[in-house]
Structure formats: C-alpha cells, structure tokens
Image (cartoon, rainbow, N blue to C red):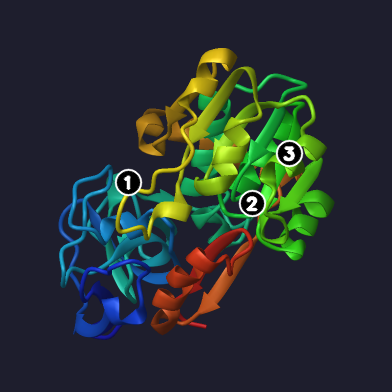
Amino acid sequence: MTDTHHAWSLAERPRGEPTRADFEFDESPVPTPNYGEVLVKVQYLSVDPYMRGRMRDSESYAEPWAVGEMLEGGVVGEVVDSHSDQFEIGDVVTGNGTWSEYAVLDAADTQAIDTDVADPPAYLGALGMPGRTAYFGLLEVGDPNPGDTVVVSGAAGAVGSVVGQIAKLNGCDVVGFAGSDEKVAWLTDDLGFDAAVNYKATDDYRSALDDVAPEGVDVYFDNVGGPITDAVFSRLALDARVAVCGQIAHYNDESVPTGPRKLPQLIATRATVRGLLVGDFAPRFGEASEQLAEWVATGDLTHRETIVDGLEAAPDAFLGLFSGDNIGKQVVRVRP
C-alpha cells in the first residue's frame, strides 16, 4: 500500500448541467481508520443521479458537499486495515466511501459481499442501494396487486430495471419508459416487461400510454419527472399509487419549471402520491438484501452494470447519467 492516493473533490458548484471543470483530481495521504472503521482499497465506485443535489448549496435530504470536499458514494473494496472486530484484512465489503483509491468506511454501516451470488459491481446496483430503493419503493409505496398495470420511468436504469422485475414477480403488467431502442429491447426481451416505450422516438406520450396501458395506470414509479410524468398523471386509474423516487429531468434546472397543473386529476382518481427515500426503511435493509440476493441466485432477478474503467473517468461516468449513457447501474472500476 502506498502512502498517497488519488481522489476527486468538488472544485466548484455547477450552474445547470455539470462539467468536468466542476471536479478536481488530487493526490493526498492515504487516510488512517479510527476505532470502528476499516480502510478499503476501492475496487468499484458508484455514481448516482442524486449526487447532483449534493453539489448545490442548499439543504435537501442529502447533505450538500462543500467546495473542496472529497466526493462520496457507494464503494466495493478490499479491507487493507481494520480497526473493527467485524472485519478482517482481505474481506471484500461494500459501504459508503469516497471517489478515491482508498476509503475509510464506518464498520457499522459496512457489509461483506458474497461473490458466489453475484460479482462485486452488483452490490452497488441490484444488491445495493438501488435494489433496496426498488424493493421498498414498489412494495411499500406502490403497493402493487396482481393484475395491476405498473408504469416505470427511467426503466432501464439501476432502480427502474429492478422495479419492473419485482412488479412482474408480483403478477403485474409492466410498462417501461427508456431512451433507446436497445434499452427497450433489453426491458422486453431480457427482463420480461410487457411493453416499453422509447421516449426519444415519440413526442406524444399520452398516445403511447393509450397503446400500452389502455386500462390506465395503477402504479407509477417515477424516476424522471418532466413530460413523461405529466402524461402518466393524465392516465392514472382509480386509487392509483405514485412513488416519486427521482426527478432527473429537473436536477440541472436553475429554476423550478411550471408544467401542466396535474393536481385536479388526483381528485377524480383518488390517487396517492408519495415521495420515497430509501433511508426511511433502514431498519429493514436486511430483509430487502436477503430477498434480492435470493431472487438473483435463483435467476428471478436479472441485473446489468455499465462499467467505466479508471478512477480518472469517474466524472465522465457521472455526467453520462444525464445523457442516458448507462444501461442498468453505472459503475466505475477504479483500476482496470
């Protein structure tokens, strides 16, 4: 192990869509873990859309990063120094770390991974935070019933792709919105979605919904916002449930856009709209992780990762989320 390592920090707060100029690549001493912590050599690093909010100088559900602060995210890595009875040197674990070659993790919030179930990157996707978000967001917030029509925006992403598969396991008809013909084919051919819409190939989302969800939408899992959500709201069925998980269409907006006023439609449909933060379900993370791992092991849940090589490419991987470069979970392999 070297004495120094490389890491990414926030160089300045972006205006609108971030650029590489908003990130700074530095060399600094390898950190030393304190009692109850472990030092890991980072193998894989997660980049996620919610991180855009942490670049703003405003309070939200995730604490904003300070300018000059090392960027944080989920990691998978090998323990190289342990000050915890929970882990030994050589263990491969996942937890919340930093965009860096070495990261200190709080042992209490770190888990060992089982590579017999899936390769390490899956623990940043279907078997990690996105998978748990899909699990609780659909089953607890969406509350699906057999025969329901479930519509998922951002369906080919890390969360949406798991949502759709869990909905199928619960006997639902599933429709996904995605941004390319390749993604649409993956959803329907590989993941078992009943239908999918390439939103970049049409500007009439209402008509597209009429074709694929003629009886209306019972559950809407929203990862995107914008015109797709406007269209889905106009097609909600009686007693529909809407889980608002993400709004990536608006994350780079400098002002709050005013779209069509949709709240009156909730009156007639008696629909329920609820925001979703996976951290609210933290006491039950073990339940979700166990079930997701079982589905993966039995082949009932398919996962996919888009892997970008090299820590130096981490900002590019993050920026690619906003142009839809990824299919499944976007992951950085720190050392190719």
Label 3's element? helix
Tag 2: residue type? Val
Q: For residue 117, which numbered disc appears in the image?
A: 2
Q: Residue at x 18, y 57 (%)?
A: 57
| Residue 276 placement: quadrant | top left
Q: Quadrant of the N terminus?
A: bottom left
Tag 3: residue type? Leu
Label 1's element? helix
Give the crowd class for mark 3: few <14, some 14-19, many >=20 residues within 10 Å. Answer: many
Tag 1: residue type? Asp
**Residue hosting label 3:** 209
Give the crowd class for mark 2: few <14, some 14-19, many >=20 residues within 10 Å. Answer: some
Q: Residue at x 57, y 72 (%)?
A: 307
Label 2's element? loop
Front position among marks 1 and 3: 3
Give the crowd class for mark 1: few <14, some 14-19, many >=20 residues within 10 Å. Answer: few
Q: Residue at x 61, y 63 (%)?
A: 305
Q: Nearer the viewer, residue 38 or 329?
A: 329
Which of the marked residues, 1 or 2, is nearer the chain's N terminus? 1
Q: Is residue 290 visible?
A: no
Pinpoint residue 107: horizontal percent, then vertical percent. Answer: 29, 50
| Residue 294 placement: quadrant | top right
**Residue hosting label 1:** 109
Q: Is residue 133 left or right of residue 185?
A: left
Q: Is residue 271 above or below residue 151?
A: above
Please report contact status of discs 2 and 3: CB closer than 8 Å, yes or no: no
Label 2, label 3: how far apart the Cα atoms are: 37 Å
Q: Nearer the viewer, residue 269 or 180?
A: 269
